[in-house]
Image (cartoon, grey):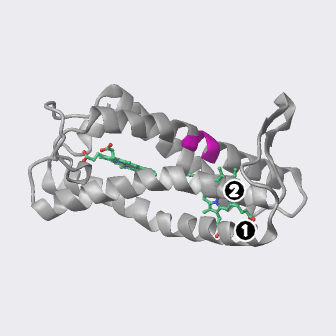
């Protein structure tokens, strides 16, 4: 009954509505975080659009983290439907990939937040006077390490998320099974 094998599978063959909503909301937030940080580079330093792109990046990422916690709990409590019939290695690779993605949506925003705090900045929504308390005190060495990690993971996960998305399209179009449909609605 190890979770990685997804043997604690639900009797039904599809994800429930909450799991589907979590999946696609987090997808949109992660896509927004990526798009904003890419756009940021195209604006000159010190300009308002650049600051806005950074703020969108930080808040989309932070929101992904806020949703990742109940999402993971829901997953651990509820389980997932058994994988579609197919080769055992594919089912195991899919399950391992899913746990890596869960780890990513927890670790990546946390690393971003740590990098900001260690650099002496707070995550803030100035218009509403909201400031997220610092997780760590300013520490330039920690900032460099954590920022490097955040950037490396951010780059690596373009590939990982791409593989995940391609796998689901492969299931849908080549294998013709319900893998994509059961996470759809
Ligand atoms: C799922 C959420 C997130 C993803 C996918 C993500 C991804 C990325 C990527 C791809 C980069 C650029 C790496 C590079 O330049 O090579 C980056 C930079 C950065 N991110 Fe995130 N990030 C996320 C969440 C956050 C959060 C929540 C914060 C802070 C609250 C944050 C703060 C930063 C900072 C400070 C940088 C460096 C920006 C710069 O100096 O240009 N990130 N992130
Ligand atoms: C175009 C983009 C994406 C597509 C087409 C897609 C598709 C899917 C599909 C079809 C499943 C269900 C797999 C199954 O039934 O075994 C799934 C599960 C999952 N996806 Fe995605 N996904 C995408 C993006 C993302 C992103 C950006 C993340 C997070 C960074 C993510 C995280 C997950 C996780 C954690 C699961 C496992 C759900 C569980 O079993 O609890 N996905 N995805």
Q: Is residue 184 visible?
A: no
Classify mark 1: residues with Cα within 10 Å, few (<14), some (14-19) or many (20+): some
From the viewer's perspective, tell me whether residue 181 is left or right of residue 84. Answer: right
Ligand 1 under 8 Å from disc 2 Cβ: no
- Would you identify the image quadrant in which residue 14 lies? top left
Q: Which residue: 36% across, 63% down?
A: 163
The residue wearing badge 1 is 142
Q: Please state which of residues 84 and 69 is positioned toward the viewer in this rendering.
A: 69
Pick whichever of labels 2 and 1 is earlier in the sequence.
2
Q: Which mark is residue 166?
A: none
Helix, strand or loop at disc 2? helix
Q: Is residue 151 above or below residue 167?
A: below
Look at the numbered discs 2 and 1 and tell me whether their residues touch, using CB distance below 8 Å: yes
CA distance for labels 2 and 1: 9 Å
> In the image, which residues are magenta?
61-65
Q: Please state which of residues 63 and 181 is positioned toward the viewer in this rendering.
A: 63
From the viewer's perspective, tell me whether residue 43 is left or right of residue 62. Answer: right
């Amino acid at each position: 009954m190890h979770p990685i094998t997804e043997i604690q599978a639900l009797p039904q063959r599809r994800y429930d509505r909450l799991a589907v909503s979590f999946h696609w909301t987090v997808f949109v937030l992660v896509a927004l975080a990526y798009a904003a940080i890419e756009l940021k580079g195209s604006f000159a330093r010190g300009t308002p659009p650049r600051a806005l792109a950074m703020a969108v990046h930080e808040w989309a990422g932070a929101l992904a983290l806020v949703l990742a916690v109940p999402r993971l709990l829901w997953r651990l409590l509820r389980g997932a439907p058994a994988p579609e019939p197919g080769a055992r290695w594919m089912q195991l690779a899919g399950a391992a990939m899913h746990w890596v993605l869960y780890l990513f949506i927890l670790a990546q925003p946390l690393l971003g937040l740590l990098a900001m705090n260690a650099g002496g900045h707070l995550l803030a929504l100035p218009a509403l006077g909201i400031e997220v308390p610092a997780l760590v005190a300013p520490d330039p060495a920690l900032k460099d390490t954590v920022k490097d990690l955040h950037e490396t993971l951010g780059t690596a996960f373009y590939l990982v998320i791409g593989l995940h998305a391609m796998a689901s399209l492969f299931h849908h179009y080549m294998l013709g099974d319900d893998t994509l449909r059961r996470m759809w609605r």
